[in-house]
Amino acid sequence: MNDPSTLSVISTKKIIQMNNVWTSYDSKSYALEGINLSIDKGTNYAIVGKSGSGKSTLLKLMNGMMTPSKGTIKIDYQTPNMNDKKFKLLMHKIGYIPQSLGLIKNITVLENILIGALPRLGKIQSMFKIFPEEEIQEAKNILKLVGLSGKEERKAYMLSGGEKRRVAIARALMQKPTILLADEIVSELDHVTARDIMNLILDAQKRMNLTAIMVHHDMQLALEYANRVAVIKEGKKILEIGVEGEKIIDFQTGDLTSQEILEMYSDESKK
Ligand SMILES: Nc1ncnc2c1ncn2[C@@H]1O[C@H](COP(=O)(O)OP(=O)(O)O)[C@@H](O)[C@H]1O
Ligand SMILES: [Mg+2]
């Protein structure tokens, strides 16, 4: 049962809105076509689809790395614009974890985590990577939170796949983000480690009132963890499902069981 005291903190603020968004990499075709979506603050939102369907492109639109050819996007009610100072400040609050994770291999775990603090440091501090003591303390706290205690001095290339994901999450949390975008970060992990990492993200969400938008290729995992699942096929959003415990609300075809959804859309969840 939902506990009313936790419900009261959930706001209906729309953190991301896309209205009829089209985007392309070249003049020949569109990578995304007519995407509409609206993500409430605090949601754990999953995007599922086959390889090449447009999932990573969708995340790149959300962090301002790409702009739409048509349609409108609002991130926290602002239109992404890299020349706008106000949007740049908002960008610092978007933690983005690419599929490749983007860790610096030959520096330590702690140093990788501290990179998340760079956007809020002064120019000189940032250039020479001079971190104030309170930032180092904060990085150490986050390191504990993600279960990497004792590994702070280890070089990133020496870590296991699961540990690397923990560092990438910690680096994103170091940004004190309001939005976390994660691109298939659990796809290559074994079942148990993937769930450990997902639980870590859920825990961080609760602590920080974070909106998590995660790309998955496993529909089962998406249904297990997300409140909302969007299915992307060939650049179009073909389905959006609301998940409440065991109950699934399919906004297009009425209530379905999770088994029916898995059977209907399992194709979309395979690479
Ligand atoms: N940098 C790029 N240049 C040209 N086309 C691209 C680029 N990145 C992705 N695409 C194309 O855009 C489409 C969607 O890609 P992507 O968003 O990466 O899909 P997914 O993440 O679902 O695998 C694909 O057809 C892909 O080939
Ligand atoms: Mg991708």
Image (tube, grey):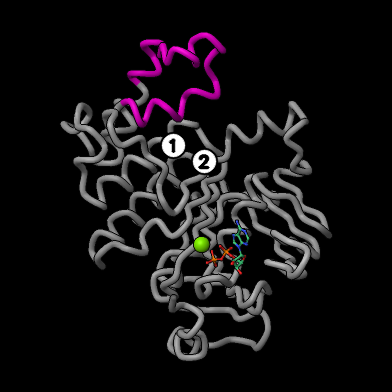
Residue at image location 44% in from the left, 36% down from the top = 173
User: As drawn, is 214 to the left or to the right of 39?
Assistant: left
From the Cβ of disc 2, is ligand 2 less than 8 Å away?
no
Percent position of residue 20, x then y:
80, 65
Q: Nearer the viewer, residue 209 or 162?
A: 162
Which stretch appears magenta?
A: 111-137
Residue 125 on the magenta segment: yes
- Kind of residue at disc 1: Leu
> Please, is residue 44 above or below residue 87 in the view?
below
> Please, is residue 200 above or below residue 144 in the view?
below
Residue at image location 67% in from the left, 44% down from the top = 64
- Kind of residue at disc 2: Gly
Residue at image location 81% in from the left, 55% down from the top = 72
Instruction: Give the main secondary structure, helix, strand or loop, of the magenta stretch.
Output: helix
Give the quarter the ligand 1 occupies: bottom right
Total count of labels: 2
User: As drawn, is 232 to the left or to the right of 189?
Assistant: right
What residue sits right under mark 1 in the picture?
173
User: As drawn, is 78 to the left or to the right of 39?
Assistant: right
Question: How much space separates mark 1 and mark 2, taking CA atoms?
Answer: 7 Å
Residue at image location 50% in from the left, 86% down from the top = 261
* Local SS, label 1: helix
The quarter of the picture where residue 170 lies is top left
* Local SS, label 2: strand
User: As drawn, is 157 to the left or to the right of 30?
Assistant: left
